[in-house]
Image (cartoon, rainbow, N blue to C red):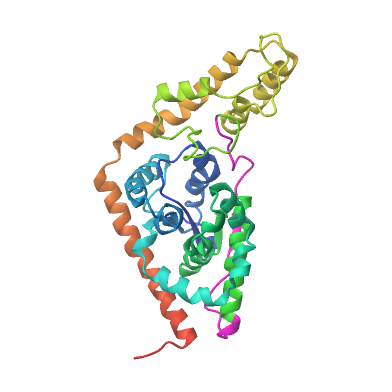
Amino acid sequence: MMNSNNSKQIVLTGDRPTGHLHLGHYVGSLKNRVELQEEYPCLIMIADTQALSDHFDNPRKITDSIGEVCRDYLAVGIDPSKSTVFIQSMIPELFELTSYYMNLISVARLERNPTVKTELQQKSFADAITAGFLCYPVSQAADITAFKASLVPVGEDQLPLIEISNEIVRRFNRVYNTEVLVESKAILSGKCNRLVGIDGKAKACKSLGNAIFLSDSSEVIKQKINDMYTDPTHLKVSDPGNVEGNVVFAYLDAFFEDKDELEKLKTRYKKGGLGDSVVKSLLNDTLQALLTPIREKREAVTKEEVGDMLSDGCKKAGGIAKQTLIEVRDSIGLRYN
């Protein structure tokens, strides 16, 4: 049952549909969403339009991923009766709001956004940056404000996007002498919000192929764990080993529940006398126990369930956004009937 004290607090979150979701998504957002839906009205946006900003030349990748993302949602416990799941491009009001907000922020401000600057470096856009990619923080502001979301779960690297959204809200309300739009507050993810990739070189990422997916078979999970980066100096069981930078221990930190036992294992590993095969076996048992029921539930999800969830979610989200747009147009003075 929803907590009455939180009835006016709305949560907005979402994912870019560019492939199956993985354990990084699980610890960074999905697990948290399942808990949040018990306390707040939650809207979960499948951000297909935002994904097009850097995948415009391969739209099939996005459209083919939407159903897979929805299966992942249902498998981990997202409840359509508690969370409204919708597709960004199916809510046309978002694009009109984005257009109005474009007038309230400078190009220089968007270029200074550290989140965008980091992504530009990662994607090697150089001088080929598109207007759509540069301006996606404005689109995100439209997403947040359209549903008057006051709480937005994000990682620490996404805080600048919330800041830009709130700047647009304040300027809109000041310029048009209104209080129609509301500012949002970030809900920061926990300590494990950025899960390292199995290669130890970067965060777990679909495009880098260094993640364990929620849909992976038991055999694939075991193989990926066996391939995990550990400590190259830990050649023999008797050798002292490093826990820091050791991917197996990073995953055990995230998923192994008995923290006291884990600390004992770390101590043994650092002193010498504990082999990589032992800790990898423990991690395999841990992840198999977590992912097997998720995978089985995912395989049982029907196309009809996905369709019903999206149909109902888009209808509900569209109704909320339509009302906000009416208020925004009225505040600007766009009244012609």
Magenta: predominant secondary structure element?
loop
The x and y percentages for residue 203 are: 57, 39
From this view, report whether residue 322 is shown above or below residue 30.
below
Q: Is residue 81 magenta?
A: no
The x and y percentages for residue 163 are: 62, 64
The x and y percentages for residue 199 are: 56, 29
Q: Residue at x 50, y 40 (%)?
A: 26
Which region of the structure is painted magenta? 174-198
Is residue 320 in sight in this rendering? yes
Q: Please name whichever residue, 11 or 87, is drawn nearer the observer in this view of the structure.
A: 87
- Outermost residue on the right side: it is 271
Is residue 7 in sight in this rendering? no
- Outermost residue on the front side: it is 127
From this view, report whether residue 41 is shown above or below residue 328.
above
The x and y percentages for residue 251 are: 58, 30
In the shown orientation, is residue 131 left or right of residue 184? left
- Outermost residue on the bottom side: it is 337
Q: Please name whichever residue, 24 or 133, is drawn nearer the observer in this view of the structure.
A: 133
From this view, report whether residue 44 is shown above or below residue 215.
below
- Report the quarter where the C terminus lies: bottom left
Q: Residue at x 63, y 12 (%)?
A: 275
Q: Residue at x 56, y 31 (%)?
A: 255
Q: Is residue 176 magenta?
A: yes
Q: Please name whichever residue, 41 or 131, is drawn nearer the observer in this view of the structure.
A: 131
Circle count: 0
